[in-house]
Image: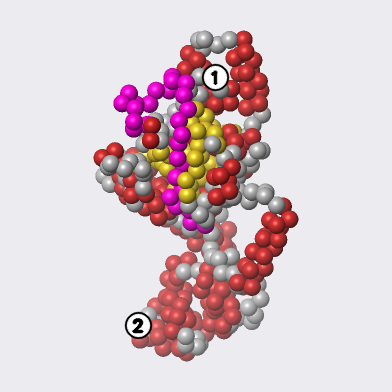
């Protein structure tokens, strides 16, 4: 085991020397190295110090050589610590070509990931030996592991000549396809026209006051996407899966939700509709996770697995403020900001749109004009910064009725779906009808 470990360390150290030597001698390759690696990615402190000098000289625009590096290290009284001019000369001798340098960069970077993970696990192990609540330890573990960057900037820097060609080809393809959406359909014509479908990698907020119909609309979005052969992941932190499916049955059959919940007042025609809807729904690719109090790390792991196993195209989370963070929870605003930032990161990494429901603060109730605005988003201003799309549900009738929301009433109310932010397109208001008795939104 020790021989294997020693051999692996020698390979890694040689890869680091090769990367440093190439950065010294090849101006072309040095840009590749500098864009993908940080000083901390090197395992030996001597290599970190050498690389730090290399980066500073690169930023200053000065030519790099062994002599100049040695001179800088001598000024900083670090030359002896890196092994002197002899070791710098030894490193320099590793260079013979810059071809294949990407492989050596990958070796250095992947070893850096492994070291960071080892450091995090050892730190957590040390915490376990102290009198620290396990909830706080878990929170620290989650934070440290999520902070490890697992991909280098290998593909981040792309010449515009390549990008413009890809964009033109995409436009040409879209022209040939006609009105085909580039994203996941919402099932609502005007919303699809504004967004061109919900786009992969987008973090989308759907917010409203309680009982305005957030979950109903989210389920409609999920059902409409699945009906068009898209895989759907639905994380329900508020409601068990049985209740979600009851709601889907109600909106599909147009049978009052109260009858489906209680099983009373159902006619033979109702049962035929329920049976037909059930047969249709069970063929849909909708995966539900109703774990209460799930945290962001669990969502990330489960969504990746769902993407792999169920070919998920869209994710819905109900709702943001119920996502837990393990710890004392002294500053909920900071916690929500972290969750929001991580959800945006997960959407990009997994390559699916994430529609996340959110509450609004009570301040909206205190205004004469109760139309929601972005500053009404509860707990954190970071949400409006992170989100690619922010949508609000608003019904004037919700405030006009003194009795409040009554799901039993078989009536329809006009509802505004307000698109207040759209990073890559237009904003506006989509007019919908909300059929409250069975929880279904339809185009007007």
Secondary structure under tag 2 reads loop
Question: Which numbered disc flags the more N-terminal residue, 2 or 1?
Answer: 2
Which sits in the foreground, 255 or 442? 442
The answer to whether residue 411 is magenta is yes
Q: In this view, does 9 lie above or below 259?
A: below
Residue 392, x across and y down, in percent: 42, 43
Give residue 255's mark: 1
Residue 324 appears in the rendering: no
Residue at x 43%, y 76% (from the top left corner): 52
Instruction: State whether residue 79 is above or below residue 135.
Output: below
**Residue 22 on image: x %, y %:** 57, 79
Answer with left or right where residue 276 lies relative to residue 51: right
**Residue 367's quadrant in the figure?**
top left
Magenta extent: 398-424
Residue nearest the viewer, comparing 170 with 148:
170
- Of badges 2 and 1, the one in the foreground is 1
Depth order, front residue of 402/206: 402
The crowd level at tag 2 (other Cα within 10 Å; few <14, some 14-19, many 20+) is few
Q: In the picture, which quadrant includes the C terminus?
A: top right
Residue at 50%, 43% in the rendered image: 430
Q: Mark 2 points at which residue?
A: 76
Residue pictured at 55% horizontal, 11% vertical: 266
Left or right, 368 with reference to 72: left
Q: In this view, does 181 lie above or below 415?
A: below
**Under tag 1, what secondary structure?**
loop
């Amino acid at each position: 085991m020790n021989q294997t470990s020693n051999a692996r360390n020698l390979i890694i150290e040689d890869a680091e020397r090769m990367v440093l030597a190439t950065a010294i001698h090849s101006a072309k390759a040095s840009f590749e190295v500098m864009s993908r690696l940080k000083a901390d990615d090197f395992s030996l402190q001597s290599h970190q110090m050498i690389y730090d000098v290399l980066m500073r000289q690169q930023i200053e625009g000065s030519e790099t050589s062994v002599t100049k590096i040695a001179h800088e290290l001598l000024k900083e009284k670090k030359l002896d610590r890196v092994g002197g001019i002899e070791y710098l000369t030894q490193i320099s001798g590793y260079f013979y070509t810059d071809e294949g340098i990407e492989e050596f960069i990958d070796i250095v970077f992947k070893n850096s990931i492994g070291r960071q993970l080892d450091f995090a696990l050892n730190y957590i192990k040390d915490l376990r030996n102290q009198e620290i609540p396990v909830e706080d330890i878990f929170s620290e573990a989650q934070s440290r592991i999520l902070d490890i960057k697992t991909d280098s900037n290998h593909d981040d820097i792309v010449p515009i000549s390549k990008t413009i060609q890809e964009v033109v080809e995409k436009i040409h393809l879209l022209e040939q396809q006609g009105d085909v959406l580039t994203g996941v359909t919402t099932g609502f014509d005007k919303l699809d026209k504004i967004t061109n479908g919900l786009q992969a990698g987008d973090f989308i907020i759907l917010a409203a006051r309680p009982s305005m119909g957030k979950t109903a609309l989210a389920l409609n979005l999920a059902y409409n996407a699945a009906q068009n052969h898209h895989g759907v992941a639905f994380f329900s932190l508020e409601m068990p899966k049985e209740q979600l499916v009851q709601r889907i049955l109600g909106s599909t059959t147009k049978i009052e939700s109260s009858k489906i919940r209680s099983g009373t007042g159902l006619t033979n025609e109702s049962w035929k509709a329920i049976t037909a809807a059930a047969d249709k729904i069970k063929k849909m690719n909708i995966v539900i996770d109703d774990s209460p109090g799930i945290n962001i790390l669990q969502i990330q792991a489960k969504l990746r697995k769902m993407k792999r196993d169920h070919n998920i195209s869209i994710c819905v989370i109900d709702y943001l403020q119920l996502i837990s963070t393990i710890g004392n929870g002294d500053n909920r605003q900071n916690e929500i900001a972290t969750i929001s930032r991580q959800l945006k990161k997960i959407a990009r990494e997994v390559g699916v749109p994430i529609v996340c429901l959110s509450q609004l603060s009570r301040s909206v109730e205190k205004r004469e004009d109760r139309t929601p605005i972005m500053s009404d988003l509860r707990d954190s201003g970071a949400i409006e910064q992170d989100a690619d799309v922010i949508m609000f549900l608003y019904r004037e009738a919700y405030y006009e009725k003194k009795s409040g929301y009554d799901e039993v009433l078989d009536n329809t109310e006009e509802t505004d779906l307000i698109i207040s932010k759209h990073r890559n397109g237009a904003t506006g208001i989509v007019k919908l009808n909300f059929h409250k008795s069975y929880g279904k939104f339809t185009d007007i």
